[in-house]
Image (spheres, rainbow, N blue to C red):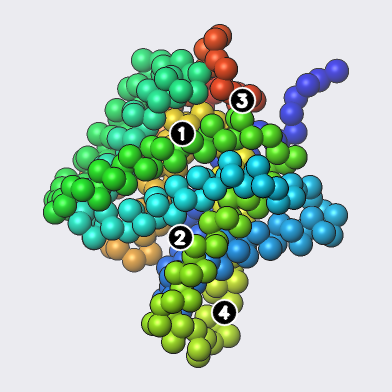
Amino acid sequence: MSDTKPFYSTSPFAVGGYMLCSATLLISNKYAVYKVAAPSFILFSQLMGTAVVVKAFEAAGKIECDSLEKEKSKQFLPVALIFLATIYTNIKSLQHANVETFMVFRFSTPIVISVADYLFLGRKLPSPRSWACLLALLVGALGYANNDSAFEVKGYTFCAVWYCIFCLDQIYLKHVTNTVKMKSNWGRVFYSNFLASIPMLFAFVFDKDELAALKNISASAATAVFVSVALGVGMSYFAWMARSLLSAASFTVVGNTCKVLTIGINVMLWDKHASPFGIGCLLFCLGAAYFYKQAPMRADAKDSDDTAEDGKPLLPK
């Protein structure tokens, strides 16, 4: 009897869905913020909307989801706080460094997270080929940043804080998928989004400018927010699924690949000045990500229940 897993439970399905949702959600969010000048409300809508959609589908008998429990809430509360801290420090970092410079910082994180995978999550260190791919990703990002814009950082503090929180986010969330037993992936989606939505409620309720923007919201603006919520549901589901199937370093590489695709879309739709060399650097990054293979588990690993297909390419063919 064949033990081949159905495609919808494999890492290519999770990675492909995550990449598709990531690229389209960025475009949707840009349009939603353009139509409704209330970014905190839009983020709250995505988080709480995702939690409501999950519970609605559970009530309809379409999916299985964990109920809200005290112990699980305690374990997922740091997930919500780290998520919000990552968003905040991301925004603050972009106030002090241009997007290209921030891209270089981000593309160096898989190197640090690979070591953290080895120290905390039972992975072996990457193979020489994978180390070369990680370095190639960083070189491609440096080439793009130096060609299309100067490497510029006015304040290192927020960039350093974001860097630490982002690495913690990748490692801790992987630890949660390994150690917190859930009925299904939808349980992780519900807990993370519901708990993170609570602080965001106060963020926009006490913002007079956002409340004023919401008073005269148009039908097209409401539709834009609704579409962003729908994409947010898919993004959250595929992100948690990919985290459960990939190592923390591999998931970070996939996230960086999404950023490359996002920049490519931005170049084609809005930013027409990118040089052939800059576009070549982006393609070089995509090639490096394609040939990267995640490190297998060590024999003495204690912090993993991975079902990942170790040694296979990350990106769907």
Which residue lies most toward the front here?
70
Residue density around tag 3, few if under 14, some if 14–19, many if 20 or more, within 10 Å: some
Q: Is residue 30 visible?
A: yes
Q: Is residue 263 above or below residue 111?
A: below
Residue 181 x/y as whole percent:
69, 34
Mark 3 element type: loop
In this view, the residue farthest toward the bottom is 216
Instruction: Estimate the spatial distance between the alpha carbons at disc 3 and disc 4, rounded to whole Å.
Output: 40 Å
Q: Residue at x 28, y 62 (%)?
A: 272
- Say left or right for 316 vs 186: left
Is residue 286 something that shows in the picture?
no
In the image, what residue type sits under mark 1?
Answer: Ile
Checking the image for residue 232, the label placed there is none
Q: Earlier in the sequence, mark 3 or mark 1?
A: 1
Mark closer to the chain start, 1 or 2: 2
Question: What residue appears at the point 38 percent right and 18 percent down from the top-left corner?
Answer: 129
**How many numbered discs, if any?**
4
Query: Is the Cβ of the residue at disc 1 closer than 8 Å to that at disc 2?
Result: no
**Residue pictured at 33% horizontal, 22% vertical:** 132
Q: Earlier in the sequence, mark 3 or mark 4?
A: 4
Q: Which residue is denoted by mark 1 in the rendering? A: 171
Circle 2 or circle 3, nearest the eye: 3
Which mark is on residue 26?
A: 2
Residue indicated by mark 4: 222
Q: Kindly check if marks 3 and 4 are in contact, taking CB atoms under 8 A apart as contact.
A: no
Q: CA distance from mark 3 to mark 1?
A: 14 Å
The picture places residue 277, in percent across and down from the top left corner, at 23, 45
Amino acid marked by disc 3 = Asp
Q: Residues within 10 Å of mark 2 (few under 14, many from 20)?
A: some
Which residue, given by chain and number where applicable, does mark 3 sit on? 306
